[in-house]
Amino acid sequence: MAVGKNKRISKGKKGGKKKAADPFSKKDWYDIKAPSVFTTRNVGKTLVTRTQGTKIASEGLKHRVFEISLADLQGGDEDHAYRKIRLRAEDVQGKNVLTNFWGMNFTTDKLRSLVRKWQTLIEAHVDVKTTDNYTLRMFCIGFTKRRPNQVKRTCYAQSSQIRQIRRKMREIMTAQATSCDLKELVQKFIPEMIGKEIEKATSSIYPLQNVFIRKVKILKAPKFDLGKLMEVHGDYSEDVGVKLERPAEETMAEATPEVVGA
């Protein structure tokens, strides 16, 4: 064995043990702000690693998608609890993350509760473009209904009736979505206006019940425009604090500074 080759045998491990640092000490909390169409604007908080070198915190926040129950967005109204709204972070201002609508879905338990035996399930989907160039895919669901004085246990629709109903669903969804912008369309989704209209229009073909827009996907969004985002957030303004009146003695003391060595 060559002399002096194993010098490190007696010494400890090279580099020593690294001290485990708390990862949360390098992170900041940001407030998530929902668009003005919803009642509750302050949705929650999100976490991001502080700006370090070329890695900017706001860049890490942009395009994050948050999934929130519509009940929470509408001030705790439990009637909307089965609907989940997706909001995407578009811009960061101060400690606030401004979001915009990014889709909608139903909770699994609500969908399962609607599907039953002895009735026909009818589904339709359509790709539409709003006036502000958002391309959406909307999914509609509906079920046949028994007539008030019906004796027969089942209420199945014929395949020709199903085709007619599906065509009607597509027509109404397209007409409603192409005539307004995304903000107005979200306002239609909240009270389920489109579903009620489909129910009314298809009653002459076959009476329907539980007609809902069960899912909305955003396929393509236009280029980011801060002006448009501020419109969606309406009355949003950054919290800069309140101006306080200072006591008279303090202002007097500042006005006459002491002259040293006079």
Image (cartoon, helix red, strand yellow):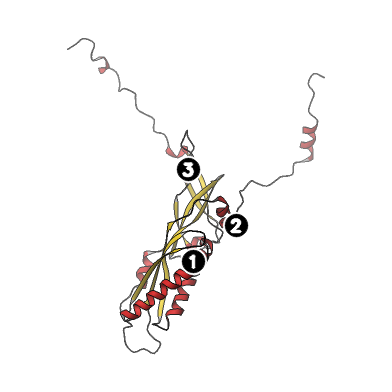
Question: CA–CA distance between discs 2 and 1?
Answer: 22 Å
User: Which residue is located at x 37 percent, y 66 percent?
Assistant: 109
10 Å crowding of disc 3: few (<14), some (14-19), many (20+): few
Q: Which mark is residue 59?
A: 3
Q: Residue 234 carries which label?
A: 2
User: Which residue is located at x 45 percent, y 49 percent?
Assistant: 64
Q: Position of residue 97 (x, y in %)?
A: 52, 49
Q: In which quarter of the image is the C terminus?
A: top right
10 Å crowding of disc 2: few (<14), some (14-19), many (20+): few
**Element under label 2?**
loop
Question: CA–CA distance between discs 3 and 2?
Answer: 24 Å
- The amino acid on which the numbered mark 3 sits, given as a three-letter code, is Glu
**Element under label 1?**
helix
Q: Using the image as rendered, state which of residue 246 and residue 146 is in the foreground.
A: 146
Q: Position of residue 179 (x, y in %)?
A: 51, 67
- The amino acid on which the numbered mark 2 sits, given as a three-letter code, is Gly
Q: Is residue 102 above or below residue 126?
A: above
Q: Is residue 254 above or below residue 130?
A: above
Q: Where is residue 32 in the image (x, y as percent from the top left)?
A: 51, 51
| Circles 2, 1 touching at the beta carbon (< 8 Å) | no
Q: In this view, does 145 lie above or below 170?
A: below
The extreme top residue here reads 3
Specify which label sits upstream in the sequence, 3 or 2: 3
Q: Nearer the viewer, mark 2 or mark 1?
A: 1
